[in-house]
Image (cartoon, coloured by chain):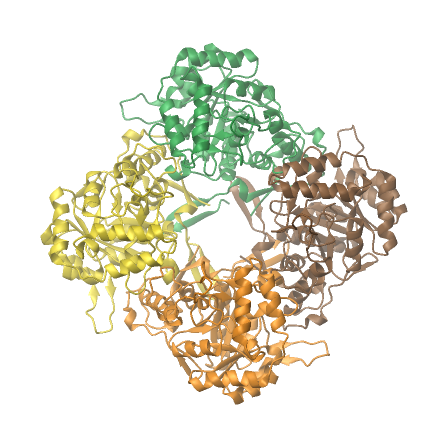
Chain colours: A yellow, B orange, C green, D brown
Amino acid sequence: MRDVVEIGIGREAARTYELEDITIVPSRPICSHRDVSLDWQIDAYRFDMPIVGHPTDALASPEFVIEMGKQGALGVFNGEGLWARWENPEEKIAQVREIALDNDNPTAAVAFLQELNKEPIKEELLTAAVKKIYDSGVVTAVRVSPQRASELGPLLVDAGMDMLVVQGTLISAQYTTDGTELPLDIKDLVHGTDIPVVVGGCVNYHTAKHLMRTGAAGVIVGYGATEGITTTGEVLGINVPMATAIADAAAARRDYMEETGGRYVHVIASGDLNSSGDIAKAIACGADAVMAGPMLAQAQESAAHGVYWPIVAAHPANPRGAVVPVLDEYEEEGEEYSGPSLEVVLTGPSSEPFGTCDLAGGLRRSVAKCGYTNLKEFQRVQLSVH
Amino acid sequence: MRDVVEIGIGREAARTYELEDITIVPSRPICSHRDVSLDWQIDAYRFDMPIVGHPTDALASPEFVIEMGKQGALGVFNGEGLWARWENPEEKIAQVREIALDNDNPTAAVAFLQELNKEPIKEELLTAAVKKIYDSGVVTAVRVSPQRASELGPLLVDAGMDMLVVQGTLISAQYTTDGTELPLDIKDLVHGTDIPVVVGGCVNYHTAKHLMRTGAAGVIVGYGATEGITTTGEVLGINVPMATAIADAAAARRDYMEETGGRYVHVIASGDLNSSGDIAKAIACGADAVMAGPMLAQAQESAAHGVYWPIVAAHPANPRGAVVPVLDEYEEEGEEYSGPSLEVVLTGPSSEPFGTCDLAGGLRRSVAKCGYTNLKEFQRVQLSVH
Amino acid sequence: MRDVVEIGIGREAARTYELEDITIVPSRPICSHRDVSLDWQIDAYRFDMPIVGHPTDALASPEFVIEMGKQGALGVFNGEGLWARWENPEEKIAQVREIALDNDNPTAAVAFLQELNKEPIKEELLTAAVKKIYDSGVVTAVRVSPQRASELGPLLVDAGMDMLVVQGTLISAQYTTDGTELPLDIKDLVHGTDIPVVVGGCVNYHTAKHLMRTGAAGVIVGYGATEGITTTGEVLGINVPMATAIADAAAARRDYMEETGGRYVHVIASGDLNSSGDIAKAIACGADAVMAGPMLAQAQESAAHGVYWPIVAAHPANPRGAVVPVLDEYEEEGEEYSGPSLEVVLTGPSSEPFGTCDLAGGLRRSVAKCGYTNLKEFQRVQLSVH
Amino acid sequence: MRDVVEIGIGREAARTYELEDITIVPSRPICSHRDVSLDWQIDAYRFDMPIVGHPTDALASPEFVIEMGKQGALGVFNGEGLWARWENPEEKIAQVREIALDNDNPTAAVAFLQELNKEPIKEELLTAAVKKIYDSGVVTAVRVSPQRASELGPLLVDAGMDMLVVQGTLISAQYTTDGTELPLDIKDLVHGTDIPVVVGGCVNYHTAKHLMRTGAAGVIVGYGATEGITTTGEVLGINVPMATAIADAAAARRDYMEETGGRYVHVIASGDLNSSGDIAKAIACGADAVMAGPMLAQAQESAAHGVYWPIVAAHPANPRGAVVPVLDEYEEEGEEYSGPSLEVVLTGPSSEPFGTCDLAGGLRRSVAKCGYTNLKEFQRVQLSVH
C-alpha cells in the first residue's frame, strides 16, 4: 500500500520517488535489439520513437521541428515564442545565446528574453512558420498556453497544425476566476478542436484524470524539471518526483480507460530526463513517450546551439527557468558550433558513453535486455528502488 | 501514526523532515493569482504578506525596518543590537562588512562583533531609534532577549513600540535558575505588557504549546538555521528539521485553540528559507508567517549590504553564527553596492529565476496554482515527501 | 520480509542496497589473521585469494593474466579483445592511453577503441596469446561473448584454455531471436564444453538461478558498475545495487543447491568494488569471489598502466563505458609509469591507507576481526545497513 | 522495535544511524548554563569535563597529556608510540608533519611512520615519559595494545600509571589463536591489574557486554572513525554508525548493571566527533564520555601542531589511517604554529562559530537548553532522526 508518513503531528505526506531512485531489473530471456519496436502512435500519428521535443525557442525553430519529424520523433513548435513575435528570431536567439555564454549570472539573459517576449504575437509570422513546418510533410504540432488557446487555435488549424499542445507549467481541467476574466475550461477547448490535443503539465493522479476527461489525446506529466535549469520547484515549492508522478498518471490512464470502456490517453513524461537510461525508466514507470529538452539542446540543429532555457524562463513577472549552456566547451570566436547532429543524438552511432547520444539506441537495447519487444509491454518491467 | 525508530537497543527517536524533503502537490482547479490574498493579520496589525525580517543588525537598521513596513511586510528592530549601543552603528557595520569580505575565515568578523556588543546599551540611543521607526507610521516591532525583556520592555513601549518580540535562540515558557538570578517566566512578561508579544524560538510541540499558554500572540518556530550561517546545530547538537518543527507547532496551535475555546496563536517559521518556494512550503506545513534572514540580506536597504549574520553570531562566549557574504560578487573599490531593492526582493518584478526575488509573487502563484485564494486554506494543501 | 514500496499507485518496486549502504559488524571473539584462509576453489582449480581480474584489454595482457595467476589470483584473458585482432596490441593500447590522458572528454578514446575493435579476430593471434598463458602454468581462463562462444570455444580449448568465461554486460540463460539468427542457449554451450564455464553478468535472483541451471560452475553478478567508468546504468537504466544483487544470487545458489541435492555454483561479484573493505562486504553478502577492475588498473603490470575501461566501452554502436585515468598523477614525458606492483596491490605490504593496496591483507584482517577463519563462514557475518 | 531490513532474499541487516542523522530536541524548561555540571567520574578519578584525548603521537606528548589534565580533561599517553621508541620523538614528529604538509598523497608520511615504529620499545624511555606525567600530578593514563598489555602493564604501574587503556582498533573479550601464540583473555589482564582499566574499541552490544564482564571500568565504543583520516571502514568494511553503536553499548551497560546488581561501566565514544554538538549528541545517545582526536589536533600543545593521524596509521602491514593536516592554513617558513591554545579548544572563550572551540562550553549550553543539569540525566534527552 502507498507509503504515507506523518511529517509532523497530524500532517501527512505520501512518499515519492525520483527516476534516479529507481532502476530497471531485467528478469526474462533477452531479445535481440533488432526485434524491438520503439513505435509510438498517438491518434492517427505514428512515430519511430517515443521522443517529443520541448517547445522552447532554444530548440524549436521550424527547421528543428522539421528535422525532429524527419528523424522519426515529434518536434513541437511554440505558438507564442519568438518566431511568432519577431521577423528575425534567429538573430534574437543568437543574442540570447551570446549573453548566456558571456555571463555566469543567468539574470541578464532572462531579462533579455523577457524583453523579447513583450513584443506582440503577429499572426502572419506565426502562420508562416507553421505553414513551413506543414509544407515539409512532418506532423505539425504547435504549443499554446491555456490562456491563449481559444484565440490562437483556429488560426493554427488554418495554417496546417495537425496536433495542438496546450501546455503551461502546471494546468488544471478547469480554472476558477476572479470575474474580470472568462473562466477557462480545457474540455471546451478540446471539444472545440477537430485535431488531437495534448494537455499538461500536471503532477498527480487527480489532475491527470481530470485532464484525461477533457477528451485530450495525451497528458503531459511534469513540467520539465531539470536541476539548475527549470526552477519551478525553487520558485513555487511545487513538484512531485517524476517516477511517482508518471506511475500515478499511468494509474489515472488505467482507471480512465475502465471508466470509458477503453479510451487510451497517452502519458508524456517531461522532467529529469538526462540520458537514454532515464527515458527507459520513464517508460518503465508507465509513460508512453517523453518530452526531452536539455538533451536535445546539444544538437547542431537546435535553435540556440547548445544553450537551453525552458519556456517559463521568459515569464514576464516570475521567471522560473534559467538560460544555461549545456556543454562544457563552445566554439572559439570565428568558429562554427560543432555539436553532434540531431540524428546522432536520436539514433547514433556515437562514441559518447554516458547515454546522451543515440537516445533511441539506448532505449532499444534496454527493452531488448529486459526481454520485451515493444514499449507497451516494457511498462510492466520489474523495478527496484534504492 | 508518527514514525518512531529505534536508533539503538531501547533508544527511540521520532523521524523528522526538512523543508527540502517535501514538495507541494496541486490537486484542485487553478485560481488566478490575482484572486489570491497574502494578507496576514496578527492581533490588530495587518500586513500585505506573511514575511517578517530577522532582527539582526546585518539587516535591521531603522531605515530597513521602515522600508519593510512600507512594502507591506514586518521589520523587527533589535533592541539589544548596535543601534542601542553605538552612536555610529552604520560605521561599525561597514567595518564588520569589510572584515567579512576581506577574510575567508569567519573568526575575525565574529571577534569584532563580540567586541562591539560589549558596549553597554544606552537608553537614549535605543529610544531614538525606536521613535524614528514609530514616527514613520509603520508597525514598530522590537526584539529583546528573554533575560532583558522586563528591563527594556517599558522603555520600548514608551518609545512607541507596537509589538514586542522576545526572542532567543531557543526559549522556554519557564526558566529554572541557580538562585543567583531571578527565575524567568515568559507568562509574567506577556501579562505585564499591553501590546502583543511574539516569543520564540522553539523546535517542538510541547515547548510551542507552553509558549502559547503564556498569552503570546505569536510563537517563532526554529532559530533561523541556515547552512554555514547559523550554526546552533554544530555547536549544540540541537535542531529539528523545519517541516516537522512547523507541523508540530501547528498541531500545538490547533490543540491550544481547542483548549481555550478559540484563541489563535500565530506560528512564525524561522530557518531553512532559501527561496519563495521554501516560504510556500513553510506555510503549507502550517506556518502563518515566516521570518526571513539571508534572503533579505541582498537588498539595497539591508544594513550590511549583502553580508549576513544572525544575532547569535555576537554571543560573547559561545558564538553560534558566522558573518557571511550572501552574494557571489561585490562592488569594486569606489563603487556602490548594487543589490536589488527591497521592493524587488519582496514583490518584484525580477529577472532572477531561482526564487530569491519577488518572494511574495512566488508565494502568490504557488497558492493560485494549488487552487487556493488565501494562506489559511493553503495550510491544507497536499504534500509529498521524498 | 522483503521491503516492497509503491512508487506510484499500483506500481511496486523492491527496496535494494548498495555495498556502501552496509557495514560488517564483528560480534565474536577475534581470530589471528594468520589463521584465516582466503582459499577459493572452483571446480578443480584452487586460488590463494578470491580475486578475479576483469577481462578488459586495459588490464589483461597475457603477461598480466600470468602474473595474476602467479600471485594466487585468477586473471581472465579477453578472447575478443585487441590481442586477438592486432599483431601489436601493446602499441594500440599505448595509443588509447595517450588519447585518454590528453583529453578530458572520454569520447576520443572511446572512438579509437571502437575503431580498433572493428579489426577482425585472427585465430592465430588468439591462439598464440592463449598458449602463452597456458605455457606459463597458471590457470588459463578466457572470456568470450555469448554470441561468439560456440565459434571460439573449441579453438580456445585446443589452445589450452582451462576455464571458459561467457560474459556480456547482462546475459540470460536463453535468448529469443527474430529468426534471422540462431537462438542462443547457454545450457547448450556449457554442455558442449568439457571445461568449467563461468557465465554472467546478471542482477537478480531469477536470472541467476536460470544461469545456474545451465550447468555453469560460476555465475557473475553485476556488470562491473563503477561511477564514471561503466555507464550501463546511465545508458540502459538497468541496475540493481550490488549488496542486494549479491544476496539475491546467493539465495539462488542456496535454492539451486537444494533443487539439485548439493550442486554448488560459485557467485562472483562484479561492480562497485573500490577497496579491500568492499571486497569483504561483497563476500559478507554472499559472494564466493569478486571480479576486480579499476582497483587492479594501478598495477605496474596492467596493460594500460593506470588507465581503465570496461569491455563494453568498445561497443560499436552503443558504448557503455569510458576510458578513465584511475590515478591523480602520471609520469612526466620520458619517465616510466611508476604504479605499485600487482603483488603489492594484491598482498602488500603497503603504506597506502585507503584499502586500495594489499587487497588480500585487508580482507584477511576483516575476516579475522569478525572471528572467522574462512570465507564460507564469513558469508554469515552480521551486517548493518545505514 | 529494532528496524531490520532484508537487503536481499534471506539476508537481514539492522538499520543503524550516524550522529549526523540525529538531533537533540529540547522539551523542558531551560536551566542556567551556570547550573550545569559536566563532571565525569570514573573509578576514583574525577574530571571537569567528559573529554578524553586519543592516545596518538600526533597529540599526546607527555606535555599535551599533562595539559589535558590541568584543563580538567583526561589525556592518554601511548605506551607503544614514538616516545617509547626514540630519544628525540619531537624531532621525528616534526619530520612526519613536514612530510604530510609537503605531500598531497598520504603515503609518504604513513611510510615514514611505519619506519619509525619499527624501532623497538625501550623501557627506560617509556618509564621516563610516564614518570614525567605522573610527577605533574594529573591522572596518568597509558594506552597499550591487547597483545602487549601483559608485558608492559607492570612496568607502567611501577612508573606511576593510574589508569590502563587497553585499546586496539577493535578488540574482543577473548581471542582465539592458532597455537603459535598464547590465547589472549582481557579478563585475565583486568584481574591482574590493581588500577582501573579501560578497554576497546568495539561496535556492538554483544562485544560491549563481554568487555564489561571482564571487569573493565570503561569500554570504548568505536575506533575513531573520521572521514578521510581513520580508514578502517574502507580497509576492513567494518563499522557501525556511531549513534547506534553508542546506544547499543549503553544498553549493554544497563543490562550488565542489572546482571551484576549495580556495577556501572563507563561508555566512552570514539568516532565521528567534529564539533561540540557532536559531543552533546554522543552523550545524548548514552555515552559517559568521548574520546576526541582530530578536534584536539588544532591546539598549540598538540605534538604535531595541526597534523593528525590515528595510531593505526602506523600499522606495519595494513595501515588504516592517513596523516592529515586538519587546518586550512599553516605557518610560513620561519613562523611559529599559531593554533588556539588547548584551553581555548576545551573551554573557550572563542570567536570560532562552528563548534570546534570551547567544546565544554558548547556541551554545557546544550545541556542547559535541554533543561538538565548533569550528563547522566542528559542521556535521557529527547532525540529526533532525519
Residue at the image point whose x is 58% and y is 67% from the top: B313
Q: Residue furthest right?
A: D158
In the displayed structure image, the side of residue A227 where residue B241 appears, left or right: right
Residue A218 image point, x, y percent: 23, 51
Residue C94 higher or lower than C287, as above or below? above
As rendered, which of C251 and D197 lies closer to the eye? D197
Can residue A172 be seen at all in this image of the molecule? Answer: no
Residue D310 image point, x, y percent: 69, 44
In the displayed structure image, the side of residue B205 where residue C312 appears, left or right: left
Quadrant assignment, res B371: bottom left
In the displayed structure image, the side of residue A212 where residue B269 appears, left or right: right
As rendered, which of A38 and C95 lies closer to the eye? C95
Q: Residue furthest front?
A: B334
As rendered, which of B322 and D156 lies closer to the eye? B322
Residue A327 image point, x, y percent: 36, 44
Residue at the image point whose x is 56% and y is 83% from the top: B125
Residue at the image point whose x is 29% and y is 44% from the top: A296
Residue A26 higher or lower than C74, as above or below? below
Residue D355 image point, x, y percent: 63, 60
